[in-house]
Image (spheres, helix red, strand yellow):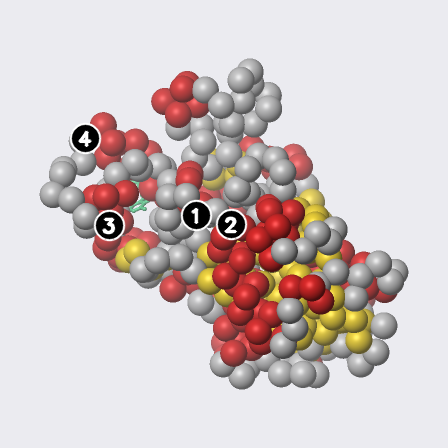
Amino acid sequence: MGFEVIGTGMYVPGEPVTNTQLTRVMDTSDEWIHQRSGIRQRHFAAEGQGVSDMAFEATKRALEAARIGPKDIDYILFATMTPDYVFPGSGAVLGGKLGINVPALDIRQQCGAMLYGLQLIDGLIKSGVAKTILFIGAEAHAGFMPWDDWDILEGKTDRKQTPEQRERANKHRAVAVLFGDGAGAMVFRATDRDAGLIAAKVHSDGTYVDELLIPGCGFKTRPYCQPRLYEEMLYVPYMNGKEVFKFAVTTLPKCARQLCEESKTPIEKIDWFLAHQANARINDYVREQLDVPVEKMPMNIDRYGNTSAGTLPILIDECTRDGKLKKGDLTMMFALGAGMHWGCALVRW
Ligand code: UT7
């Protein structure tokens, strides 16, 4: 017994925001952002639009592709690091919008969530707990962007940004330019066909917690939400970009090679390398290390930026709809995110 993906869908909010538009609120340039990361544009969730709203839109498309209705889903797995509420989880909120009250489990492995999700889906299906699982990866990073001047960014006003606001945004420009919002949905179903998870390796290393995190608004402070956290901008992620970059390019090729060795899978037999989209340079480096042809690693970071847990489901939806991913294809997925959490998985489509 394995699983197969019977439908996928994605949703990104509003109009794309280009690199050049970002120069309205911070000192940056299309050249800097594109050279360093491969990103040209991203989308941002609107005020009041949460991950459950974006996930609902992506789910409608995935269910339509799968030709099933919400009542056919018997489990929801929701991956996000930017939930609608601190509690409850966004999976239950989505279930409410879909009109179903099945088990709903939120997971928070940031950009590495899909790999953990695959292990859970495999386990839930093999143990007979679930037959049809809705997996969501969705993020609303707009809430931690280091500017307040959304009207200036969107070109809706002639108002000028204050020097103080620009300085606040500039402090976090290296992180802010990387992230974008969106949701990807995938419907997994039990199958007797030779498909599903062949092998996976997932890891975590909490000694790296200080290299990439949101330093404030957790429950170590009383109250957990206070003006000081806004003043000191502790709601914006801190990232030691160089350290995270180094960690990714050393651990991901090693992880992929080990997985191939342990599962006796020759790397050249893999049809598609589906990589998390944090930085095009990280993916190019991993691809070169593994000696993988460029056409086997589809990328969409130029259009969406890093959508954290949303990235792999969005990429997979695009690859399914444009006819790349086909039944029987062998894929390797890999990703790394805050925690650190990282891993790779071999999946037969
Ligand atoms: O999914 C989460 C995982 N995250 C990642 O995988 C990210 C990994 N890290 C990276 O991708 C890179 O470290 C970054 C793209 C984030 C940054 O690249 P970098 O080459 O490490 O740049 P840097 O932070 O060292 O900054 C270099 C220069 C600095 O100027 P000085 O001090 O050399 O004069 C920065 O102030 O670039 C400046 N800078 C910018 N300039 C224009 C930083 N951010 C920007 C910006 N626009 N947005």
- Real-space Cα distance between discs 3 and 4? 18 Å
Q: Say which residue appears at 50% left-offset and 73% top-offset.
A: 318
The numbered dot on residue 163 is 4
Q: Circle 2 sits on which residue?
A: 51
- N-terminal of the pair, mark 3 or mark 2, is 2
Near-viewer residue (199 or 67):
67
Numbered disc in front, either 2 or 4 = 2
Q: 60 above or below 174?
A: below
Q: Give the residue type at disc 3.
A: Glu
Q: Residues within 10 Å of mark 1 (few under 14, many from 20)?
A: some
Q: Position of residue 237 (x, y in %)?
A: 46, 37
Disc 1, SS:
loop
Q: Quadrant of the C terminus?
A: bottom right
- Real-space Cα distance between discs 3 and 1? 16 Å
- N-terminal of the pair, mark 4 or mark 1, is 1
Q: Position of residue 70 (x, y in %)?
A: 65, 64
The number of callouts visible is 4
Q: Residue furthest front?
A: 99
Residue 144 visible (yes or no)? yes
Near-viewer residue (256 or 121):
121
**In this rendering, would 309 be left or right of 327?**
left
Q: Say which residue appears at 49% left-offset and 55% top-offset.
A: 54
Q: Circle 3 sits on which residue?
A: 154
Q: Give the residue type at disc 1.
A: Gln
Q: Residues within 10 Å of mark 4 (few under 14, many from 20)?
A: few
Q: Quadrant of the N terminus?
A: bottom right
The numbered dot on residue 49 is 1
- N-terminal of the pair, mark 3 or mark 4, is 3
- Real-space Cα distance between discs 3 and 2? 21 Å
